[in-house]
Image (tube, rainbow, N blue to C red):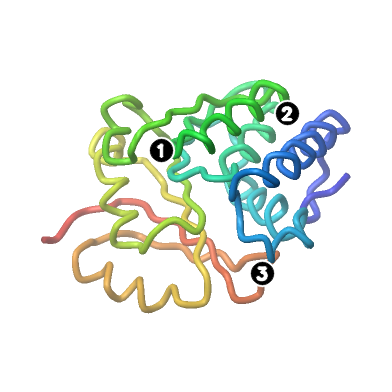
């Protein structure tokens, strides 16, 4: 099986397939994603999430903010199993969604831990991260503020933030309060989307 042109093992394919089955089951009772996106689930959510990990496919310590239905956190945790190392801390304050994520990690044998806490409280519980990820969560200015405590502890921290077509407006607002290095990665799944990779984050005001 290939994900975005990258070959994955049969075991990883089986884990992803089981996750998809769990998702379809749980989505009948709790709102995990917009129902209109379910018809193209593999491309819209699994492949779209996988490309975030594929930018830095190393056994890093990831912190996934607002994990929701598992994107990209669960997908990252599953893909890390091929490396046999690395870990994802998934932060999701909604208790029902957190319960779903715990089941996914356990049944898919993925490398992660669920924290059913507010994002603002997460740095006190999760002391370290190499990469912060988030998808469809909040505006960039807020995401950079959420990530700042981890950057203060690790100057090599990277942020991989999935954004849609309106990202330029959010970037202009963020530049008024933050200084950073930025690399824009064009999405290989959604033509109008990008993954913004931030590093060397510094608050201006």
Q: Which mark is residue 106?
A: none
Front: mark 2 or 1? 1
Q: Nearer the viewer, residue 98 or 197?
A: 98
| Residue at the image point whose x is 84% and y is 32% from the top | 14
Front: mark 3 or 1? 1
Q: Which residue is mark 2?
A: 82
Front: mark 2 or 3? 3
Q: Which residue is mark 1?
A: 93
Marks 2,1: beta carbons within 8 A:
no
Marks 2,3: beta carbons within 8 A:
no
Label 2 sits on a secondary structure element that is: loop
Label 1 sits on a secondary structure element that is: loop
- Can you tell which quarter of the image residue 141 is in? bottom left
Is the C terminus in the top left, top right, bottom left or bottom right quadrant? Answer: bottom left
Distance between the alpha carbons at the discs numbered 3 and 1: 28 Å
Q: Which mark is residue 190?
A: 3
| Residue at the image point whose x is 67% and y is 60% from the top | 35
Q: Position of residue 131 (x, y in %)?
A: 45, 41
| Residue at the image point whose x is 47% and y is 30% from the top | 89
């Amino acid at each position: 099986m290939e994900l975005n042109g990258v070959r994955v093992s049969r075991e990883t394919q089986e884990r992803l397939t089981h996750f998809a089955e769990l998702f379809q089951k749980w989505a009948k009772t709790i709102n995990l994603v917009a129902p209109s996106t379910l018809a193209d689930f593999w491309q819209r959510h699994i492949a779209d999430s996988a490309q975030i990990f594929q930018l830095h496919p190393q056994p890093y310590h990831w912190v996934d903010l607002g994990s929701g239905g598992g994107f990209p956190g669960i997908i990252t945790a599953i893909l890390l199993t091929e490396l046999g190392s690395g870990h994802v801390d998934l932060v999701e304050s909604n208790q029902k969604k957190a319960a779903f994520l715990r089941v996914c990690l356990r049944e898919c044998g993925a490398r992660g831990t669920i924290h059913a806490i507010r994002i603002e409280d997460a740095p006190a519980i999760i002391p370290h991260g190499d990469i912060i990820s988030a998808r469809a969560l909040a505006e960039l200015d807020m995401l950079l503020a959420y990530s700042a405590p981890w950057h203060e502890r690790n100057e090599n921290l990277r942020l991989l933030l999935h954004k849609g077509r309106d990202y330029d407006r959010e970037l202009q607002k963020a530049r008024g309060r933050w200084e950073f290095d930025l690399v824009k990665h064009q999405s290989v799944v959604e033509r109008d989307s990008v993954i913004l990779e931030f590093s060397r984050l510094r608050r201006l005001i």
